[in-house]
Amino acid sequence: MGSRALVRVCWHGGPSFSLDLAGTVVLVDPAFSKPGDYPPWFDDKCVNPHAPTVEEFLTVHRPDYVFITHGHFDHFDLRTVERLAAALRAPIVGSEAVVRTCREVLGLDEERLLACPEPRDSLDRAFEAPAAPAAEASRLWEDLAPGVRFRPVPGAHWFTGPEGDRVAAKLAGRPERYGVMPCGGPMLGFVFAVDTPRGGRELTVYVSGDTEFGSFPEGPFDAAVVSCGGMLMNPSTRRVEGPFLDEAHLARAASETLKAGVLVPVHYDHPVFLTPFDIEKLRAELRTYPRAPRLLVPTYGNWETLLA
């Protein structure tokens, strides 16, 4: 296998990144919109500040799939998905709610969409997959390409599930709030699996979306790309809450629950967070765990080896 990268990561700022899985490229939660792409609610505090424009992205990247973790504007950017769909044939992958929104709001054809396995109890079993019989667990995987698979993993996050369904329904009839919350549905993470050459064991990469502490799946995973960050404004109460996932809790989750070989923190640079996230503090927290992951802090817009 040598030093050839089997899995690479490219961070596009905020929650947005690409994974190259042995040649199959998936783009996760692309949020590239700028002020003016939405009604006035979408201002500088909503923008992914280090993201390329869609046009800049497409000059370099041609993903095979686009994955959406949940229905919040900073992860499910309707304008970005619409523009990518117009330029690419890449299927959009997400929950039934995400897929329905792509079909009914963006007008995408059914063959462009891939809904994650339903019913919900299947996703609950995926959350507990290490304890599931091998034959049953295998049915939870979807093939992306020869030797590359994924499965959805549910997690907890505010304004998702039934609460998210109610909020999204209220906003659906308000054009001045278009895009604030494109849909409800579950909070989904994803596990990607890549076969290694010569029949070696598979490599697994967990992608968290906005999964909160206490609802991460049990590892081990070879790598984990985890959204983290500081304090947030609750849009319902207008009170500052959090932090969403601070340095200490991320280090604990990555080391003890995810049991990750490599940890990639993302999203913490987004202005939606009202307090900073300190990478050096995270590094120090990781040193307190005997089996802590290696920390990879990617630079914006550059492919970097995640697993080789």
Image (cartoon, rainbow, N blue to C red):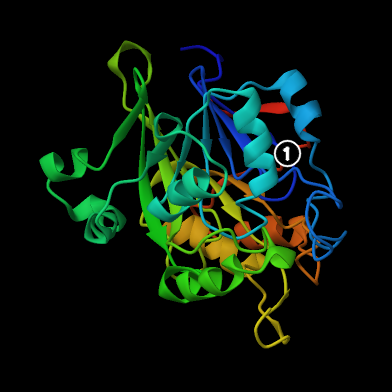
Q: Quadrant of residue 28?
A: top right
Is 278 placed left or right of 66 in the picture?
Answer: right
What crowding class fits label 1: few (fewer than 14 Cα within 10 Å), some (14-19), or many (20 or more)? many
Above or below: residue 134 compared with residue 292: above
**Label 1 sits on what residue type?**
His
- Check disc 1 and report its element: helix, strand or loop: loop
Q: Looking at the image, which residue is at 67% across and 28% down?
A: 304
Q: Quadrant of residue 12?
A: top right
Q: Nearer the viewer, residue 36 or 120?
A: 36
Is 69 placed left or right of 279 in the picture?
Answer: left
Q: Nearer the viewer, residue 306 or 239?
A: 239
Q: Looking at the image, which residue is at 82% across and 44% down?
A: 50
Q: Is residue 200 visible?
A: yes
Q: Nearer the viewer, residue 169 or 57?
A: 169
Q: Position of residue 91 (x, y in %)?
A: 48, 30
Q: Is residue 159 visible?
A: no
Q: Looking at the image, which residue is at 28% across and 38% down?
A: 141
Q: Position of residue 177 (x, y in %)?
A: 71, 66
Residue at image mark 1: 12
